[in-house]
Image: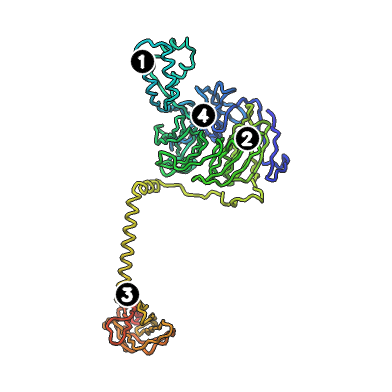
Amino acid sequence: MAAASSSDYDVCGAESSEANSKWLDAHYDPMANIHTFSACLALADVHGDGEYKLVVGDLGPGGQQPRLKVLKGPLVMTESPLPALPAAAATFLMEQHEPRTPALALASGPCVYVYKNLRPYFKFSLPQLPPNPLEQDLWNQAKEGPIPPLGCHAGPFPCRETAEEPLSVQSLRFLQLELSEMEAFVNQHKSNSIKRQTVITTMTTLKKNLADEDAVSCLVLGTENKELLVLDPEAFTILAKMSLPSVPVFLEVSGQFDVEFRLAAACRNGNIYILRRDSKHPKYCIELSAQPVGLIRVHKVLVVGSTQDSLHGFTHKGKKLWTVQMPAAILTMNLLEQHSRGLQAVMAGLANGEVRIYRDKALLNVIHTPDAVTSLCFGRYGREDNTLIMTTRGGGLIIKILKRTAVFVEGGSEVGPPPAQAMKLNVPRKTRLYVDQTLREREAGTAMHRAFQTDLYLLRLRAARAYLQALESSLSPVSATAREPLKLHAVVQGLGPTFKLTLHLQNTSTARPVLGLLVCCLYNEALYSLPRAFFKVPLLVPGLNYPLETFVESLSNKGISDIIKVLVLREGQSAPLLSAHVNMPGSEGLAAA
């Protein structure tokens, strides 16, 4: 074991000293004999003791002897062989029961091996595919009687070239044999049933119904037959199946399966397809100019690395946001998430021995390694929250720890969102009532929208009727006619039993005076007495406010109050021009007596 001689570069590209470096060199072993890629690395508390281990799906030297390795610190704690090359590794919670120990899922060949406490727990196998009909007929003919080898040899060839469905492994092995070996192979395997099995190409996890970090998650599998499968975390049944135009190689998901989720799949045809809940086929397509080598989601941005030595940022609807050119080919990518500072960034391992860290298109840090890095993993390891684990092309293992005082700062010339925008909000967890209400709104969305529209139309109709009634009966304190543009409001003064009622009448026209108006007060004569309940209004000059005063005497000694209606009339007309309802206060003088 030796210390790695690495140096960090700031945004301006100046080399920093070891004392000013953001990383601590924890471990470097060039002879660790670990050959893997980023999808096969996972950090998890597999024993529930607070000590996080590193789970590695090791390909083995030259792709031979694949093994599952679990590292504690710099040492390999356990090691077990795998039946096929690993495709991906992930940790997830299967249930809410205590103790909350995460399970380990390892995709290898057509199976997903699930471990709990590092012991085999369950094996999920992909469902078999229907065989090629022409291939099935040829093997059925071989069962019925002897067929010359040339006949069998000539039969499957057009089947392989023209058929839409691929051949089984048995037929492919038959086509690779020499002519003299075919008859013995047919006699040996003609009684076997034809089986066509797909394999897993990629795997990730999706939260089931809560967005919490310790919530139950589903496994999402990408298969060689261009399908995406979502598995139930407890029964390991297929909850959803989606089809893609090509074979998926990288997956990124966001959201919850029971509520709403988005799934981005980078495929071998150079496109990225976006799928949403309840969609069997892609909703959006992002066409790349080169093959993707990595796909990472940073907040709401999809960061894609391509074989053109560049990073691209896209929205979930396929709009390109930015592009950054790399100095060398990109070998691997992964997410750097620092929870204490709310930082999310992209790590890219390059062929020239650099590991570059970007937030959007801003370069935050550069790490130099002795060998090209082929896999990256950042997270809690042991009891350190921010640990960077790297494996090199020669099988070496590098472990670095981010200093607690380290702060990633962008260059002043870089344009981007403010740092506060990257801070996570403390969003409360979704309750079961919220989830049920969301499901109800999704299922009955059309009926709820129709009911809302019906209520809105009824509200508008009632408001129009009330407005029309107010205009016809002159219940408004503002005149609606252009011939008599008047405005009226009343003020009541006093404690009782005698009140002063002041009516402010104003002519709102621009140049025409108004005359010949009358004021009439309607009231309950058992409760009130007005010496001037009906009087004439003098000439109203435009723009002036005319206060008309009268006194109201309360006759009830029980503190009862009522409404007095004030009507403004024109001589010779029975319909009022405008009216006002005065809510009289209770007489405090009589109540005190």
Q: Are marks 2 and 4 in contact (CB under 8 Å)?
A: no
Q: Which mark is residue 449?
A: none
Residue 98 screen position, x and y as percent: 45, 36
Q: Are marks 3 and 1 in contact (CB under 8 Å)?
A: no
Quarter containing the N terminus: top right
Q: Amino acid at mark 1?
A: Gln
Cα gap from disc 3 to disc 4, whole angstroms: 77 Å
In this figure, which residue is indicated by the disc labeled 2?
329
Query: Mark 3: which secondary structure?
Result: helix
Q: Nearer the viewer, mark 2 or mark 1?
A: 1
Position of 184 compared to 523: left or right? right
Q: Nearer the viewer, mark 3 or mark 1?
A: 1
Q: Nearer the viewer, mark 3 or mark 4?
A: 3
Quadrant of the image occupied by residue 143: top left
Q: Amino acid at mark 4?
A: Ala
Residue 235 screen position, x and y as percent: 39, 32
Q: Earlier in the sequence, mark 2 or mark 1?
A: 1
Q: Earlier in the sequence, mark 3 or mark 1?
A: 1
In this figure, which residue is indicated by the disc labeled 1?
141
Foreground of the two, 130 or 149: 149
